[in-house]
Image: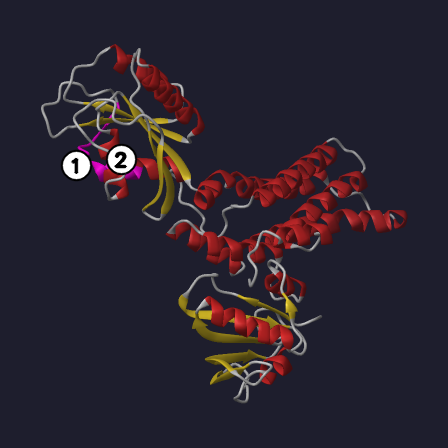
Amino acid sequence: MAVIAAISTALSNAAIGLVRLSGDGAEKIAQSIFSSPLKDRTAVYGRIVGKNGETLDTALCTFFKGPHSYTGEDMAEFSCHGGLVVLRGVLEAVLDAGAVPAQRGEFTKRAFLNGKMDMSQSEAVIDIITAKSTLSAKEAFLQAGGSLRRVINELRSQLLDIDSEIMVYADFAAEGIEAPDATKLCPMIEAAMKRTEKLRSSYGTGKFLKEGFPVCLCGKPNVGKSSLMNRLIGRDRSIVTEIAGTTRDIISETIELEGLPIILSDTAGIHESEDTVEKIGIDRAKEEIRNSALAIFLFDASTPCDEDDKALLTLAGECDSLIVANKTDKNTVFIPDGAILISAENGDGMENLISAIKEKALGSAPMDMGETITNLRHRQALDKAYEALSRAYDAIFAGVDPEVAELDINEALCQLGLITGETVSDDLIDRIYENFCVGK
């Protein structure tokens, strides 16, 4: 393959920037523009020289002899001063020396093609880069290390055991081998189905972990929604005044709560109003409630319950919600049933609220870090694998020829192979790596 090259750090001025090249001949190209002899797996200091002999930068160059590199090929990385002018000059020198510009994700694509990682690990690389929280970064890091691959391989091994039971009969039936016993095969298939179901059902949590958990703050005007927003964020984001109806539009912010990414939205106060602008804000607030995974209904514990409060309690019962009584630092006259008691003013009860939000997002059961499906493509493959296994189970249970069920077992194996890349098409490979940045 041709030697590819790219700037692998962000295209902005920084203290240090990286220019990376990979492929047969990477050592020759790197050495042709570098003043010091390269050493395998050693950072060497020297000057980078352009085609006219001028010094472009002083830098460190680290050479990796394949297959002991990220891509499995010969690689060289120049750690330069991070100015864009410098980095582009170094990249131009590398290209003048014979390299070609790398395409999106081409370094990681070569790592996959050269067997350095499977497809699930490749996709986890971009998840590490785009992680929105500590937990999402940890999940992506574990998957990049092969945690999901190991689970999929264990499941594939289960299916291969089932397949071999059937194929022995298919290959040697003429020699008197009896058909496999349904009382043996059905429990084996059922066990594989349960493992598949556990994996695919983790996508709900995994999606929130990767993309963020949408939480909407709603309630009457002046119940403390903006104060709670600012308390959760840790800074003044929403305007807080004694004047009711300060918030007219949706204000959103992505925050991290105990490692979990939360997309938090503050909305207009919901109540009966004749104000045209305020009514638009109220309609948007109700739409935000419908679009959020969780709505936090905030009530003022220091004022009596009125008709607007009753209407909001009814609305809360129609969606996944938490009932929260705010202003408990004052005289309390109204505490809705099951409400979490807080004071957005002084922070009382915030630990209980944060725990409740986290439980809504992740569920009460402990999460299997590294074994949570965060990729829709993986979920779709597991759905199809489960459907195939279900057909195989029904066929074996009904006494249909086991060879018919074997076709579905193979379909399930094929779908699992799409996750690890064993049965993935060239077109899908290209499409996956198009989502990567250049230089990774």
Quadrant assignment for the C terminus? bottom right
Q: Is residue 48 left or right of residue 351?
A: right
Task: Tell me the SS state at disc 1.
Answer: loop
- What amino acid is labelled 1 in the image? Asp
Question: Where does residue 45 sit, x and y in percent of width and height?
Answer: 46, 85
Q: Residue at the far right: name it.
A: 174
Query: Quarter holding the N terminus?
Result: bottom right
Q: Which mark is residue 348?
A: 1
Residue under label 2: 238
Which segment is the magenta one?
338-355
Q: Which residue occupies 15% across, 18% down?
A: 303
Residue at the location (81% across, 44% down)?
Answer: 178
Q: Nearer the viewer, residue 123 or 35?
A: 35
Q: Does residue 234 sit above or below 60 in this rendering?
A: above
| In the foreground, 241 or 347 | 241
Q: Is residue 363 visible?
A: no
